[in-house]
């Protein structure tokens, strides 16, 4: 499949671009599990880093959230790629860009909770499973990490 010309930008909490990424995350990650965003969940993202991936014409293709943890560690969460862009390299590009951004912010380790179906994707990008399987939002997950 042909690769899309992509670019990423850091977006501000509460902006129209943030709302657009929230909608994508809801469509891809929440609705299939019959979950809804709660106001308290969204409010907690105020000081987190929001990264959006676009094609030409500001066409949103994917997004993720980076949540600073203890010193040197950042947690990647809420990775979502538009359904019609899955398998086109958008997720890989977005994760790689988030790693570059995290390094620029001084982080040395990325952690994440991966759905069991996403384990091979993250392993191909150098992430390693840590610990045992656990259930989050009703589905199996593994904690994964990578030194940046």
Image (cartoon, rainbow, N blue to C red):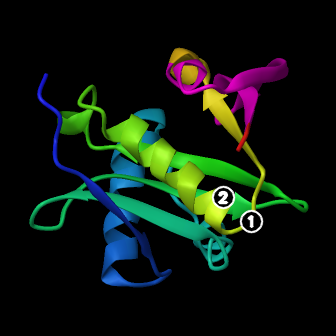
96 above or below 97?
above
The answer to if 127 sits in the magenta stretch is yes
Which of the 4 quarters of the picture holds residue 39?
A: bottom right
Q: Are marks 1 and 2 in contact (CB under 8 Å)?
A: yes
105 with respect to 29 (left or right)? right
Q: Which residues are magenta?
A: 121-146
The answer to if 87 sits in the magenta stretch is no
Looking at the rendered structure, which numbered label has been put on residue 103? 2
Residue under the image location 23 percent in, 30 percent down: 88
The answer to whether residue 30 shows anywhere in this view is: no
From the viewer's side, name the closer residue of 68 and 46: 68
Distance from Cα at disc 1 to Cα at disc 2: 5 Å
Mark 1 element type: loop
Tell me the residue that label 1 is attached to.
106
From the viewer's side, name the closer residue of 134 and 4: 4
The answer to whether residue 19 shows anywhere in this view is: yes
Determine crowd level at label 2: few under 14, some 14-19, many 20+ residues with C-alpha closer than 10 A. Answer: some
Q: Position of residue 47 (x, y in %)?
A: 67, 78
Quarter of the figure with the C terminus: top right
Determine crowd level at label 1: few under 14, some 14-19, many 20+ residues with C-alpha closer than 10 A. Answer: some
Looking at the rendered structure, which numbered label has been put on residue 68? none
54 above or below 126?
below
């Amino acid at each position: 499949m042909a690769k899309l010309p992509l670019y990423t930008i850091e977006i501000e909490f509460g902006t129209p671009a943030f709302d657009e990424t929230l909608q994508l995350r809801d469509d891809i990650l929440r609705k299939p599990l019959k979950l809804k965003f709660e106001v308290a969940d969204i409010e907690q993202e105020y000081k987190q880093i929001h990264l959006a991936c676009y094609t030409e014409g500001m066409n949103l293709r994917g997004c993720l959230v980076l949540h600073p943890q203890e010193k040197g560690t950042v947690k990647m969460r809420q990775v979502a790629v538009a359904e019609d862009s899955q398998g086109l390299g958008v997720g890989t590009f977005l994760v790689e860009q988030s790693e570059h951004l995290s390094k620029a912010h001084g982080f040395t380790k990325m952690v994440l909770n991966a759905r069991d179906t996403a384990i091979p994707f993250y392993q191909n990008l150098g992430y390693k499973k840590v610990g045992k399987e656990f259930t989050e939002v009703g589905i199996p997950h593994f904690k994964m990490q990578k030194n940046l």
